[in-house]
Amino acid sequence: MCQVTHRIMNSLTASNMWMIPRQNQSWVSEFILVGFSSDPTTNSILFIVFLLIYLSSVLGNGLIIMLVCLDTQLHTPMYFFLCTLSLLDMSYVTTTMPQMLVHLLAHSQTISFAGCWLQMYVFGALGITECTFFVVMAYDRYVAICYPLSYTVILNWSLCIRLAAGTWICGFLSSFLNTFFTMSLPYCGPNRVNHFLCEGPSVRSLACMDTHLLEMVDLVLSVVLVLVPISLIVASYIRIAKAILKIKSTQGRCKAFSTCASHLTVVTLFYLPATYIYMKPNSSYSTEQDKQISLFYTAFTPLLNPVVYSLRNKDIKRAFLKVIVYGRWTSGPRW
């Protein structure tokens, strides 16, 4: 009996000794963003490449915003939404790229806990906003093609403002919940994030507790915020395709398909990598591969969006020539 009691006491003591260090353990106050490489030469080359990508993204999206604001013939719902998308892309790339550029040249790649929290929140908010905003743009194309005579009546200025503001509110509220749950986890080391930014899955993998429940919550949010918008976009384009096939003129069908091609291209470039990253559990998280995929929708998508829309859009080209080449713009009726 005494031996059994002695063994139980030893077991409890060992258990308490295991718990005490965890209670007294200092929590992580900063994270180290590993980035892409530890070789200075490689980082210098990457710095030049990403600097050019960042400047091109800001200039390209800024140019679209300027053209839409200056040319009153572009004051239509479609170009209002395009201008909002460009603003989203500029904000999106500015959330990650400047810090990444600094870390490529600096000896220290640290980011404070609060800085990581803020970057994760803003990055997630802008990403969710863009996810839902693509639904609004699909609705715009649906109304323009299926109800062309009532286009400006249905999508009036008041409705456009409410739709755009609603996507921003949805994005920032949803991101707050996800970021709050992620950053409330205990982080007691290690603090090396194998990523170039504080993105939810990469940071969550460092938590020193079981994150299965949070992964399930995150999966539900991802289904709502990714699959539901995709379903609405697909449904819109099914209706659009049926309406286009009813057009008797071949030229009319080609023009209608052309107006949707740019939006479909941008949606595909954004949703495919984002769905891959956020629709899988942490257990299948592959740091190097997922880091490269994240780079696609954080850097290349904001760069490609202005190119996709401007190369296929005669109105943007016309406005560019008037504003940039001739130094003037039209003064048509305001929308």
Image (tube, rainbow, N blue to C red):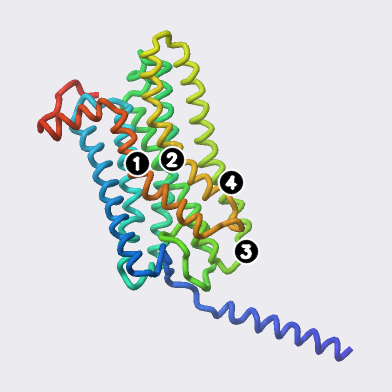
Q: Cα distance, mark 4 to mark 1?
A: 30 Å
Q: Are marks 1 and 2 in contact (CB under 8 Å)?
A: yes
Q: Amino acid at mark 3?
A: Asp
Can you see residue 103? Answer: no
Above or below: residue 104 compared with residue 19:
above
Q: Report the residue at 38% width, 63% height from top.
A: 115
Mark 2 falls on what kind of element? helix
Q: Which mark is residue 210?
A: 3
The residue under label 2 is: 269
Above or below: residue 271 compared with residue 100:
above
Looking at the image, is mark 4 or mark 1 nearer the viewer?
1
Q: Which mark is residue 220?
A: 4
The quadrant where residue 38 appears: bottom left
Q: Cα distance, mark 2 to mark 4?
A: 23 Å
Nearer the N terminus, badge 2 or badge 4? 4
Give the percent coordinates (x, y) of residue 323.
15, 32
Q: Amino acid at mark 2?
A: Leu
Q: Residues within 10 Å of mark 1 (few under 14, many from 20)?
A: many
Q: Which mark is residue 148?
A: none
The residue under label 1 is: 304
Q: Amino acid at mark 1?
A: Leu
